Amino acid sequence: MSDVLTLIEQPDSKLVADLHPSPNIEPRLRGLTPSILILHYTGLECVERSLDVLSRPDCKVSCHYVIDEDGRIIQMVAEEMRAWHAGVSSWHAETDINSSSIGIEIQNPGHNGGYPDFPPEQMRAVTALCQDIIARHGIAAERVLAHSDVAPGRKIDPGEKFDWPGLARAGVGHWVEPMAVDPGDRGFSGRKQGPEILAAQELLARYGYGIEPTGIYSERMKTVLSAFQLHFRPARVDGRLDLSTFATLRRLVETLPEAATS
């Protein structure tokens, strides 16, 4: 934990309305700099409670920014510092996501608190802050991620209601239009193994998800597919490898920049 001299004294973004320093910080490890932007929801009932939890030493969590329901942006940790927001997580085999990312907590009580819609003014602020961070750090579109992407099963935020398509239209994040869901389609997940299952696992791993291609439909694959669906095919989140999920995943990987797939 850092001492008071390292707490944030001035905002990194002109969009910040307030500072609420958190002591739960440390230097980024191994010389890593921000190359990932992680979006979360707070999962707490109000912004005051969220700011309290994210700045209490005993809670051992923090983030760089909190965005209230009215769009107010509060910075808690300087971008140059390592905040404690991602937890046990991975992306493209990198396991110290905290050292390579900036974390934005979006005020929303989450699934355990009724999971209300994200208000338009809040989403406008999310979009503007993401645009600002991406421009300053050169973060690639495919590295704007949900907490659920980097921690499948352990985390489900910001969830299926989050407006990833709207962000993409504003130049934030990677998105393709999902294939429509056929209510009667059970796809390939009724099988325990097969070439389609292996192909899907290879595509998930190529995109960045933490999964080993085995060709076997396992509980881990169901968990990772659910995380993928939360972000990229939210119409039905059930962890099944249906035709819609497979087609959407394939198109998503096909539209990656060449550098991201090498």
Image: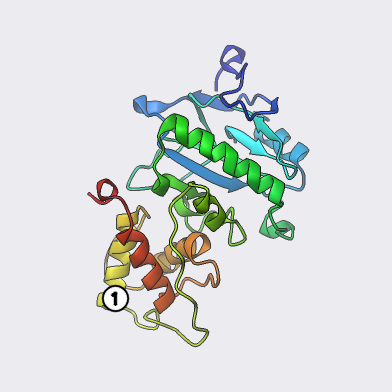
Q: Residue most toward the bottom?
A: 184
Q: Is residue 139 above or below residue 197?
A: above
* Amino acid identity at mark 1: Glu
**Pointer 1 residue:** 196
Q: Is residue 89 visible?
A: no
- In the image, 44: left or right of 91? right
Q: Is residue 110 visible?
A: yes
Colour setup of the view: rainbow
In front of the other: 101 or 125: 125
Position in image of residue 151 (x %, y %): 47, 52
Q: Is residue 170 above or below residue 236?
A: above
The residue at 32%/54% (across/down) is: 256
Q: Is residue 174 above or below residue 8?
A: below
Position in image of residue 257 (x %, y %): 30, 50
Say which quarter of the image contains residue 198. Answer: bottom left
Position in image of residue 59 (x %, y %): 64, 35
Q: For mark 1, give the secondary structure.
A: helix
Position in image of residue 99 (x %, y %): 43, 32
Say which quarter of the image contains residue 251. Answer: bottom left
The residue at 46%/49% (across/down) is: 173
